[in-house]
Image: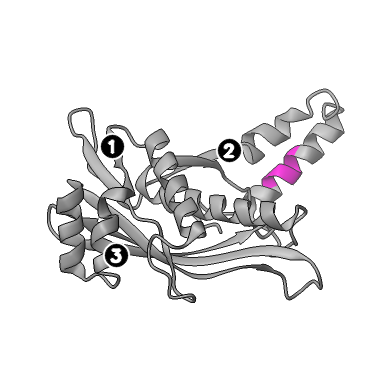
Amino acid sequence: MPSRARFVLRCAALLLSLGLFNCMPGLLVLPFIQEEETIPKQYDLGTGCFSHKSVVIIPLKREDNYESYYNSPHGQTIARHIASFLSQNVKNVDILSPACAAPYLKEHPEPTEADWAQIAKNCKADFVIYGTIHKFTVSDKGYIGALRGTLEGSLYVYSAKNGSIWDFNKRTLYPAPTRMGFEPPSSVGRNETIGRTLALFSVQAAQNFYDYTRRKRMDEAPGTPRP
């Protein structure tokens, strides 16, 4: 048993022995369950009080259907969600319309690094975010007739300043696994399961670009990754 859990149990035993538990039920809960931690961003867009940056987010393409960047409704939804989250959480960032890149990408459906540089130039963007959906399903093999969202994707960030490309992979499950590792099926319908999975993937992707806080579980160390 983790040392913190043992400490909580000892506090509970002490309060019970003093007859104080019923008078102060929140005493044990707030310091431990409600504790928060800050998760630092993984990629710095370089924005600040005197520094504006422009970002264009290209709709993700579907790898399994060989779709282009603008032909996947799910890819378009993810791009819109990420744009919204960045606008809300990153100061002095200008989100550009992905329409600025559409003509060029239609002529170059398999863009190279040089093509992304040209897209950044055409859109007058400091960064270009693009990616691929590798897998997206809402069927749950563990439960006949049940739904469970699974989305696996890769995102890339092209920097016009130095030509570098930063990438990361993400696997999102909806509903998220429990603390004990159990993966419950969705309690909502198919369309809502699809929508919630896309939204969850998007916010987890966007959180790479800004600091955020979350409630820290009592049994995990600071900074422990969570699905």
- Disc 1 marks which residue? 94
Q: Look at the numbered discs 1 and 2 and tell me whether their residues touch, using CB distance below 8 Å.
A: no
Looking at this rendering, what residue extends furthest in the top direction? 23
Q: Main secondary structure of the magenta part?
A: helix
Which scheme is used to colour this image of the protein?
Answer: one colour
- Disc 2 marks which residue? 35
Magenta stretch: includes residue 51: no
Q: Secondary structure at mark 2?
A: loop
Q: Secondary structure at mark 1?
A: strand
Query: On the image, which quarter does residue 128 sit in?
Result: bottom left
Mark closer to the chain start, 2 or 3 = 2
Residue 144: image x %, image y %? 81, 73
User: Where residue 106 is drawn, which disc sits there?
Assistant: 3
Magenta range? 7-11
Mark closer to the chain start, 1 or 2 = 2
Q: Where 17 falls versus 172 (above or below)?
A: above
The foreground one among 34 and 86 is 86
The kind of residue tagged 2 is: Glu
The kind of residue tagged 3 is: Lys
**133 left or right, relative to 176:** left
Q: Residue at x 40, y 44 (%)?
A: 83
- Which quarter of the rendering shows the N terminus? bottom right
Mark closer to the chain start, 1 or 3 = 1
Q: CA distance from mark 1 to mark 3?
A: 24 Å
